[in-house]
Amino acid sequence: MSQDIIRSIEGRAKKENVSVFEVGDTVNVHCRIFEGGKERIQIFNGVVIARNGGGSREMFTVRRVVAGEGVERKFPVHSPRIAKVEVVRSAVVRRAKLYFLRDRVGKAVRLTERRVERAADVAKTSKMKRGKKAKAARREAKKAAE
C-alpha cells in the first residue's frame, strides 16, 4: 500500500525534458537562484563523476577545481531548480564512479575525449574518400549532375 503511494508521488515529481548525459561528461549545469524577489541562472561547470539513485530520486555529482581547490556539488536530476544540463564534451570512461579524480592534480585530471559522430560529420567524411575508385565515382556523379 505505502509502495503504491510512493510510486504515484515519484511519477508526478519527474521532469519530462531531462538532458541526456553520462559519467565522464563535462557539463554546464544551469541552476536557478532566487535572491529576494528576483530569479537568475548561475552556471556550474565541471565533470560528472557519479550518478546515484533512480527514478525521481536520481542525483548526479559534478566536480570542478576552483583556485586550486576541488569543489563538488550534488544535484537532483529532476529538480525544478535546474534549468538545463548542457553537455560540453564527452569522455571515454571505464568506471561507473570517477572518485579517483579527487586524488589527481593538474594534467592527470584530463580524460580522453570521446568522438561523437553526427550525421553531418559522417556525410562530410564520406565525400572525402581517396583512391582511384572514389575519384571515378566522383567524376561519374559530376557528369550525372551536368
Image (cartoon, rainbow, N blue to C red):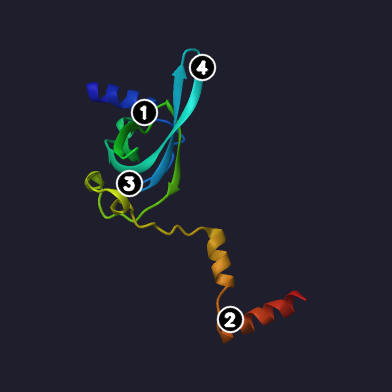
Q: Which residue is mark 3?
A: 23
Q: Alpha carbon of mark 2 to alpha carbon of mark 4: how far?
A: 60 Å
Let me know if residue 32 appears in the view.
yes
**Image point 73% across, 80% down: which residue?**
143
**Image point 48% across, 28% down: which residue?**
41
Let me know if residue 1 appears in the view.
no
Q: Position of residue 48 (x, y in %)?
A: 33, 43
Q: Are marks 2 and 1 in contact (CB under 8 Å)?
A: no
Q: Which residue occupies the foreground of this view, 96 or 141?
A: 96
The numbered mark, 3 or 4, whose residue comes first in the sequence reads: 3
Q: In the image, what residue type sits under mark 3?
A: Val
2 vs 4, front mark: 4
Q: Which residue is mark 4?
A: 38
Q: Residue most toward the right?
A: 146
**Image point 26% across, 35% down: which residue?**
53
Quarter of the image with the N terminus in it: top left
Which structural element holds mark 2?
helix
1 vs 3, front mark: 3
Residue 50 located left or right of residue 35: left
Q: Which mark is residue 134?
A: 2
2 vs 3, front mark: 3
